[in-house]
Image (spheres, rainbow, N blue to C red):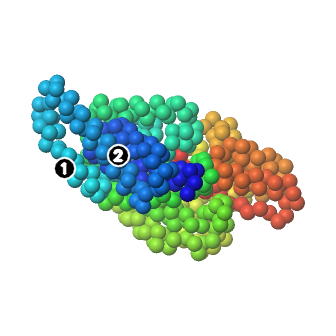
Amino acid sequence: MTASETHRAIHAVWRIESARLIAGLTRLVRDVGLAEELAQDALVAALEQWPKSGVPDNPGAWLMASAKHRAIDQLRRKQRLERKHEELGHELETQQALSVQDLDAAIDDSVGDDLLRLVFISCHPVLSTEARVALTLRLLGGLTTEEIARAFLVPEPTVAQRIVRAKRTLAEAHVPFEVPRGPELEARVSSVLEVIYLVFNEGYSATAGDDWVRPALCEDALRLGRILAGLVPEEPEVHGLVALMEIQASRLRARVGPSGEPILLLDQNRALWDQLLIRRGLSALARAETLSPERGPYTFQAAIAACHARARTAEQTDWPLIAALYTGLAQLSPSPVIELNRAMALSMAFGPAIGLQLVDELTEEPSLQGYHLLPSVRGDLLFKLGRYDEARGEFERAASLTRNAREKGVLLERAAACARDPLPQPPSSPPEGKAPTRRR
């Protein structure tokens, strides 16, 4: 294996293992900032040693063992310092009881709900919403500061500052590493749902990079959602979110072609859709609707996803129902992105002119400036109306705005198709991808 191949392997391992590593270390050291530092120290050790020794058979265990040794050293130093200053009191007795043997046993335990604990600590009320999202994506999603900045269209230093301040705030507030109980649990569920879905969305439609989807992120988010549903089984929106993620995850195999190119919703081979996940999603949706006659935003979106899942072919899609569901969602949780999705649904149900009229009203919306799906949708509608030159400009503008290489390629192909003989028409599809709640 060459050095570059080893570095790519290390990067892939880090993506998969970092959240579990940080979660397990946080349980050990009770400080999320210190846990991340220890995990990154292990990563640095891997970067130094693996190019010489080769990637170990169990790289995740190697990273955990390396981080564990550093954690034990840290705690030993802390214990010695505390003894010297005679400041231990009752806390010292507890720390002293935490022998190295205990540490080994603790770190070797199954991570169990550690990831869920990490979600709740990352979503603690002492943090701003922006900080909760950034910290969770960093700690659980394994996203870099740059990727988070691109996802939310904010400067990279801003995201870096949010993460640093968030970790400092958690440490200063002595936030316990535990899943809250009772009323506090209910109050924090909505924040956790938002963050889980943002993580899922980054996996379902990657903001940047060479990959259109990141299945591992979707799997982590879906697993966390299922665990949360078990903890709060009477909360309908938890089941609504799980339903939404199950149904969307069922399409992952069909969302990319053999070369990794994006396959849009209406062009997907529905035989590749995972029927088990669809059944699980429909069951979760039924559970949510049974618990409450009033749909929340996630249950609305799950109902829309279910319309696609139930259609045996793209032509059988119930677009009038989808448009009605988007109207209900827009009334419940208004946002420009939901309006953009509603415009596309209306165009599919009643013709592109109706959709274009609504999209044109969104072109001056400040929060959509720089949002590539706005010109992408507008280009699609213009193309369907035979306004090819205008459509080409919109597709080119959308391509210039996206940071995902695969998505850029599709948009440039559509722009090129507008310049050629427009018949036969290139495939078109609704703007499947980012969550309607992604931008407000």
SS at mark 2 in the image: helix
- Residue at the (61%, 55%) spot, across then down: 212
The answer to whether one can see residue 364 in this image is yes
Task: Tell which residue pokes out farthest to the right in this image.
Answer: 421
Circle 1 packing at 10 Å, graded few (<14), some (14-19), many (20+), is few
Mark number for residue 308? none
Q: Residue furthest front?
A: 52
In the rendered structure, the answer to whether residue 367 lies left or right of residue 74 reads: right
Tell me the quarter of the image containing the C terminus. top right
Point out residue 418 in the picture as x, y percentages from the top left corner.
83, 55
Residue 135 to residue 320: above or below = above
Horizontally, is 286 left or right of 8 in the view? left
Q: Element type at marker 1?
A: helix
Q: Residue at x 55, y 57 (%)?
A: 1
Q: Are marks 1 and 2 in contact (CB under 8 Å)?
A: no
Residue at image position (21%, 29%) is 81
User: Is residue 296 in view from this perspective?
Assistant: no
> Residue 294 is drawn in which quadrant?
bottom left
Instruction: Give how far across and how far down residue 49 sits, in percent.
Output: 45, 48
Give the labeled residue for mark 1: 101
Residue where numbered disc 2 is placed: 67
The kind of residue on which mark 2 rests is Ala
Q: Position of residue 252 (x, y in %)?
A: 55, 64
Q: Tell me the CA gap for discs 1 and 2.
A: 16 Å
Q: From the viewer's perspective, is residue 396 above or below residue 204?
A: above
Q: Residue at x 87, y 57 (%)?
A: 420
Q: x%, y% of residue 423?
A: 85, 64
Name the N-terminal-most of marks 1 and 2.
Answer: 2
